[in-house]
Image (cartoon, grey):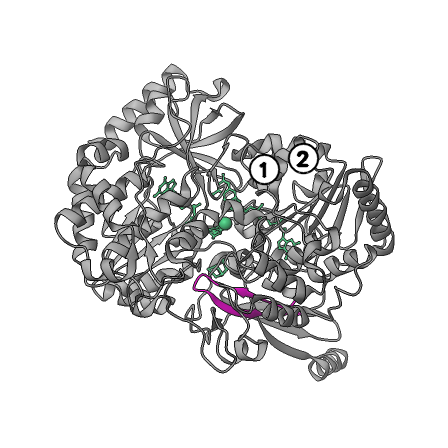
Amino acid sequence: MSGFLQHFRQINERYTVSTTNQTRCPYCSMQCTMLFHRENTPFSSRFTITPNKEDSIVQGRMCVKGLEAHTPIFTKERITSPLLRRHGTFIPVSWRTALQWLKRKVRDIQKAHGFDAIGVYGGGSLTNEEGYLLGKFARVALRTRYIDYNGRYCMSAAAAAGSQAFGIDRGMTNPLADIPLAKCIILAGTNIAECQPTMMPYLRQAKANGACIIAIDPRATGTTRMADVHLQPKPGTDAALVNGMLKVIIEEGYYDSKFITAHTVGWEEMSAYIRTVQMSEVSHITGIPEADIVQAARIYGQAESGMVFTARGVEQHAYGVQNVRNFINLALVTGKIGKPGSGYGAVTGQANGQGGREHGQKADQLPGYRSIENAEHRRHIAEVWGIKESRLPGKGVSAYEMMERAAAGELEGMIVLSSNPVVSNPNARFVEEVLRKLPLLVVVDLYMSETAQLADLILPCASHLEKEGTVTNLEGRVMLRKAVQPPPGEARPDWRILQDIAHILGQRRTFRYGGARDIFEELRKASRGGVADYSGIKYERIEKEQGVFWPCADERAPGTERLFEEGVFYHPDGRARLAHVPHLTPPERTDDVYPVTLTTGRLLHHYNSGVQTRRTPALYARAQAPVLQIHPETAERLRLVNGARARIHSKRETIEVDVRVSKDIREDTVFVAFHWGDEQCINRLTLPELDPQCRMPSFKACAVRIEPVESTAPTRKEQKKHEQEKACAYR
Ligand SMILES: Nc1nc2c(c(=O)[nH]1)N[C@H]1C(S)=C(S)[C@@H](COP(=O)(O)OP(=O)(O)OC[C@H]3O[C@@H](n4cnc5c(=O)[nH]c(N)nc54)[C@H](O)[C@@H]3O)O[C@H]1N2
Ligand SMILES: Nc1nc2c(c(=O)[nH]1)N[C@H]1C(S)=C(S)[C@@H](COP(=O)(O)OP(=O)(O)OC[C@H]3O[C@@H](n4cnc5c(=O)[nH]c(N)nc54)[C@H](O)[C@@H]3O)O[C@H]1N2
Ligand code: SF4
Ligand SMILES: [Mo]
């Protein structure tokens, strides 16, 4: 080796600094931890990411999305300085310029149109501290009633159903560790294999312990393939299906009358209704043979313990609350709740899908799951915030309704943090037009999302690697995510951005935080005595105890791992509420013009509106465009073959996608994932019919017509060849 090389190597070794820090994945509600190893030499800087073998909650696992989550963060696509639109193009400006510009805009709009003329739109990827601060920012700094967030499209149906039935809304009523203790598990409208992959080992362990798993999904997925029984309903018919199951449970005597009498309200009315249910009608509505419904009901009814899980397949309907209430009915009438291996769980979605819905991002909510319409709740929060109660605005409207208000000219401006509504809202073309025309659109993001492209001002924020804060996982366990590096360029953590804007709007006194910890300390006080009580949780505890379950009102007592032990629910009388739920079907019926039901959802390799994962080459390579999943018989009828191009029309819009013929879906249903924007945005087709209680739209059922795009439609010769191939394949 030459002397120079040797010298080079010595210097390199001598001054190389290796660090390993723990942080968390930014994506799903499992919140797997990862180790971020960095090696800084005098000449280079390298890093690698590995799963954290010591994370006992996810047993040292991560999925492919998590392992790639850092990739877009280090690309040139990161926005690293404020960008102001001038004459149609974005130009980088200083924070000072950006904030002064914003101050003028906000002042002018509010002077002319009132405080409520500006709305705030948040997201469930924000930490608890940021979600909390966003609520305070809207009400105290902007003084607007209009704030809502993407969780309206995510968890709102389960949240309302949980609150109504139990008096509390916490994703899972039990810890993950209870899953292997369950003898029957119902997975309704949840694709855990693709959406919470590191939860799968818990289900496999349950199976190994003898559990029977029943999956309910119009499609066969990685999740249903792991199940013992797969019921494949028509989209939007789960309520009727559960009514059928309840009928069997009641008629064959699998209900727990002692539990019902001691711990519930509403049995008489509910059971009287269930007696009128006709199994043949249920079978007709759902498209599931009667015998299969009876079998599923018997398995769950007879099992000594059981857990029921729902996710967006059941919840994202214009009657999602009712759907979930019926699944909760199953748990309550059989007394399978509040015990090891028995409970209910809404499988939460985003990293902080749970915490994000507890501390004030919702139109009608104050921190700690308090109500903005309750005088006592308002007084408590006003006191913590150091303002007069009368200064707190009233309740606003839900996410989509904010878009409608904007279209009607009631909103003149919107600040969007951590969401991409142009891709993720129903009736997306309308939403895009609304935001395009809005006199003021501010977007706080890491990338030039489809929504950011319409902004007047883009503010660059820190990524999950660059900011500290807490998130609450699907179990209701509050966990800490740590920063492992500073933000690049001029990017700032969301909390700091909100504080900076609050300051230029004259709110120095009420926004005085040095970091996320200070905000958490205030959140603790604000949540004290609320349903989502975090007052006993401290950063130090979270670190020491691998997270703390809420409610936790005492610094010295453990959090509440399992809810409703002893059958005590959170309503004032301690009883849970049973509901009688009629058979429900999608508001947009299929007919001769739109004869097929479109349902939408997710793929393993992409995350939500795709802003992050489409910028991740290893993930993008696996799914570059949306495809239409369609049954072979339906495809044949429509003269579509694998790889052909199809046009999908709904009453609202038309898009074109490639075809994937697959037996994994019902004949009357097609599926398209929603991870793409612009011409590939499936939400241009979906309908904004909202649940009357929670304002969830009908993402999972909309009527469509499908036709081949003529240039790619198979010729008669190709069609014949295809038919011959098919005949061969069946021989
Ligand atoms: N890979 C990946 N993981 C994610 C996400 C992601 O985008 N990608 N997003 C995260 C977020 S925010 C969320 S909310 C969760 C969502 O997690 P899930 O709710 O599990 O995901 P979806 O794919 O939306 O829907 C689940 C299933 O519902 C089925 N379904 C459709 N209609 C019906 C119906 O009427 N009844 C029934 N029973 N089932 C129906 C679909 O076929 C689908 O397989 O995932 C989180 N994790
Ligand atoms: N058709 C159909 N539509 C759906 C659904 C469906 O199943 N079908 N599911 C719905 C559901 S469950 C959800 S949750 C929504 C999700 O839809 P969106 O809210 O649009 O979801 P994301 O893609 O997660 O948007 C996150 C945006 O925030 C940015 N971001 C990430 N981290 C941060 C951060 O820390 N701070 C800030 N300021 N920005 C950040 C990302 O770059 C991205 O642009 O979509 C809903 N829409
Ligand atoms: S996406 Fe979910 S399962 Fe995958 S690594 Fe991230 S937190 Fe874990
Ligand atoms: Mo979600």
Instruction: Find disc 2 in the rendering and name its residue.
Output: 406
Asked whether residue 399 is drawn in magenta, I would say no
At numbered mark 2, what does the secondary structure look like: helix, strand or loop?
helix
- Crowding around mark 2 (Cα neighbors within 10 Å: few <14, some 14 to 19, many 20+) is many
Instruction: Find disc 1 in the rendering and name its residue.
Output: 401
Q: Residue furthest top?
A: 716
Residue 596, given in percent of the width and then of the height, sits at 38, 26
Q: CA distance from mark 1 to mark 2?
A: 8 Å
Residue at 48% over, 79% down: 545
Is 257 rendered above or below residue 558?
Answer: above
The amino acid type, in three-letter code, at marker 2 is Ala
| Marks 1,2: beta carbons within 8 A | no
| Residue 514 visible in this rendered orientation of the protein | yes
Depth check, front residue: 729 or 349: 349
Depth check, front residue: 618 or 258: 258
Highlighted magenta segment, given as a residue range: 466-484
Q: Quadrant of the C terminus?
A: top left
| Residue 466 visible in this rendered orientation of the protein | no
